[in-house]
Image (spheres, rainbow, N blue to C red):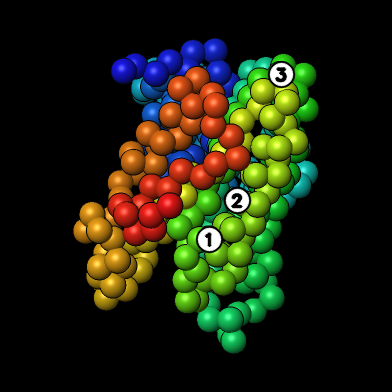
Amino acid sequence: MNISLKGEVILVTGASRGIGAEIAKTLGSSGATLLGTATSDEGAVRITETLKTMNIAGQGYRLDVSEADECANTLADIEESYGPITVLINNAGITRDNLLMRMKEDEWDDIMNTNLKSVYRLSKLVCRNMMKARSGRIINLTSVVGFLGNAGQSNYAAAKAGIVGFSKSLARELGGRNINVNCVAPGFIDTEMTQSLAEEQKKTLINQVPLGRLGEVSDIANTVLFLSSDLSKYITGSTIHVNGGMLME
Ligand code: NAP
């Protein structure tokens, strides 16, 4: 089945690589105007070039989601050029792993600010226009780690679990305006984030996955495509788990 996102104006944060880059290509290829962000000017230019090569309308922007002013200014720039955002994908995320006993305040704060507060900031910025239009989608990338926990990732797990509670609350606030808010919870996906793990750690992880392998970025992008489209119009406040069976819910 061909899913058409024609007419949608979609913002994907962290679209320069990994899962976000694949989401941008997949949604753009389905007809949406695609705005993708990177933390550097070079990254933003690369996004613009990739979209151009694929004949996708839109462009890259430089944005650090942990900076409130940058979020507001970038959103204003985008809306001036492309009109209101109709689908927001909060994908940007980082890890600062450490055991709690060694975890520094800035390792905790960086994760909260980049992975969780950014979701509050950007959702708040897009939802006024969505409420006016009585239509919109917000899709937040959480993680299996937010549900299972992971030694060395108490900061990351707390932020990702926080995203789920935030999304459920927002889904209740905005449901009456026909705005759907959902999460996608990847298991372990083959990206730079997981490539940095030691081989031994990777083997241990794969042993916990009934399908016996890491996921691919397209597994996540296809789920986001479904949640961005009308096929999922009666789903809100939910999390779709994409983890090879690692967690069955
Ligand atoms: P990745 O390959 O490390 O890419 C991270 C993306 O986020 C990059 O585009 C990066 O931009 C951007 N980013 C980082 N810090 C940012 C900031 N302060 N402001 C704006 N953008 C920022 O990560 P990934 O594996 O694709 O993960 C994408 C999302 O899925 C994250 O939310 C992650 O927590 C979640 N997730 C991933 C996995 C996995 O196995 N990979 C599993 C569960 C959940 P630059 O290129 O400019 O640095």
According to the picture, the residue beneath numbered tag 2 turns out to be 164
Distance (Cα) linking label 3 and label 1: 31 Å
According to the picture, the residue beneath numbered tag 1 turns out to be 146
Of the numbered discs 3 and 1, the one sitting upstream in the chain is 3
**Disc 1 on helix, strand or loop?**
helix
Which residue is more in the foreground, 35 or 228? 228
Quadrant assignment, res 26 = top left
Q: Position of residue 58 (x, y in %)?
A: 52, 22
Residue positioned most to the front: 249
- For badge 3, the amino acid type reads Arg
Residue positioned most to the top: 7
User: Can the viewer see residue 214 in this picture?
Assistant: yes
Is disc 2 in contact with disc 3, using a CB cutoff of under 8 Å?
no
- For badge 2, the amino acid type reads Val
> What is the number of the mark on residue 214?
none
According to the picture, the residue beneath numbered tag 3 turns out to be 134
Q: Position of residue 218 (x, y in %)?
A: 33, 39
**Disc 2 on helix, strand or loop?**
helix
Label 3 beta carbon less than 8 Å to ligand 1: no
Of the numbered discs 2 and 3, the one sitting upstream in the chain is 3
User: Can the viewer see residue 118 in this picture?
Assistant: no
Reply above or below: 68 against 159.
above
**Disc 3 on helix, strand or loop?**
loop
Distance (Cα) linking label 1 and label 2: 8 Å
